[in-house]
Amino acid sequence: MKYAVTGATGRLGRSVISQLVSQLNKDEIIALARDTKKAANILPAGIEIRKADYTNEKELEEAFKNVDRLLFVSSVPGAEYPRDKQHLNIVEAAKKAGVKFIAYTSFPHADQAKSPLSSDHRITEQALSESGIKHSFLRNNWYLENEFDLIKTALAGGHIVYSAQNGRVGWALEREYAAAAAKVLISKSPKKIYEFAGQPLTFAEFAAVLSEISSKEFKVESVTDGEYKNILENQGVPSQVADMIVMVQTLIRNNELAKESKDLEEVLGHGLMPLKEAIQEVIQS
């Protein structure tokens, strides 16, 4: 049996590879990456590395040869080559190569979500559903590591600003999502849909936990989207990046990341790390 992971040099991909190495023989694992030299330098020795660029369907088809089970890590939005087309390349190449199972890292409740960030995931889920390939959707909520800048600001006694109001987020550590992805990939009877998430909390609740950790006082302020964008731009954040950050705050305010689920804990077979300890892990990483 051959297990492959796309985007293997990214943080999530690397973490999944690490998990697989502890559970499988190395000759069963294939790392798929756009930059094979980088992959060889940072991934465990002894696993096969193949070149796989999401924008090149023929290259993907070659990379997927003899792959039985594939973890398809979604690409980053906003690239020059549209993400939905990248993803459709992967689905089509997997079909042609005869991949038997795909676990795809998707968006929370992608079939119902309204945020523009969910649209490419919805297209990909539909393509996988129509592909004839057995699959699981790993609908990951939010990585705690995404809040590293906010955490750093708090620890420095800075001013924490958000526009998500009382919207809630199901934060969990990226390594917890990765461990669950690895378990689904090698599972003999995976579910079709997993809503992976931590316990949903507001930014105010998140800040309260931060205050327990920080030795410095910091101000926390809820503002409008417009005010938040102005603050970001005044800090030197490019307008397009500021728009993306505000878009995330909007989807959080609309509670698109708020639904509770025990799928992550159930797949892992244990509870998630409490938020305070998880934040401390992020600080130390």
Image (cartoon, grey):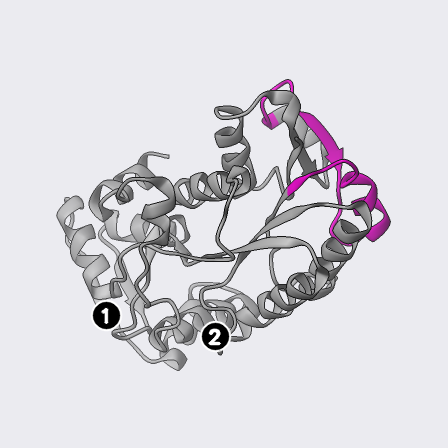
213 inside magenta stretch: no
Q: Mark 1 points at which residue?
A: 221
Which residue is most to the right? Answer: 58
- Res. 239 in view: no
Q: Image point 21% across, 65% down: which residue?
A: 204
How packed is label 2: few (under 14 Cα within 10 Å), some, or many (20 or more)?
A: some
Which residue is most to the front? Answer: 189
Cα distance in 3D space between marks 2 and 1: 27 Å
What element does badge 2 sit on?
loop
Q: In the image, residue 218 lies at what x, y percent?
A: 19, 57
Q: Name the residue under label 2.
A: 113
How many badges with numbers are in the image?
Answer: 2
Q: Image point 56% across, 40% down: which residue?
A: 13
For the residue pair 130 and 177, the one nearer the viewer reads as 130
Q: Image point 82% across, 51% down: which residue?
A: 96
66 inside magenta stretch: yes
Dot 2 or dot 1, earlier in sequence:
2
Q: Image point 42% across, 68% down: which residue?
A: 232
Residue stretch rendered in magenta on the structure: 42-69
Q: In this view, does 158 lie above or below 109?
A: above
| Quadrant where the C terminus is found in the figure | top left
Q: In the image, residue 23 lies at what x, y percent?
A: 49, 26
Residue 176 found in image quarter: top left
What element does badge 1 sit on?
strand
Three-letter amino acid code at disc 1? Glu
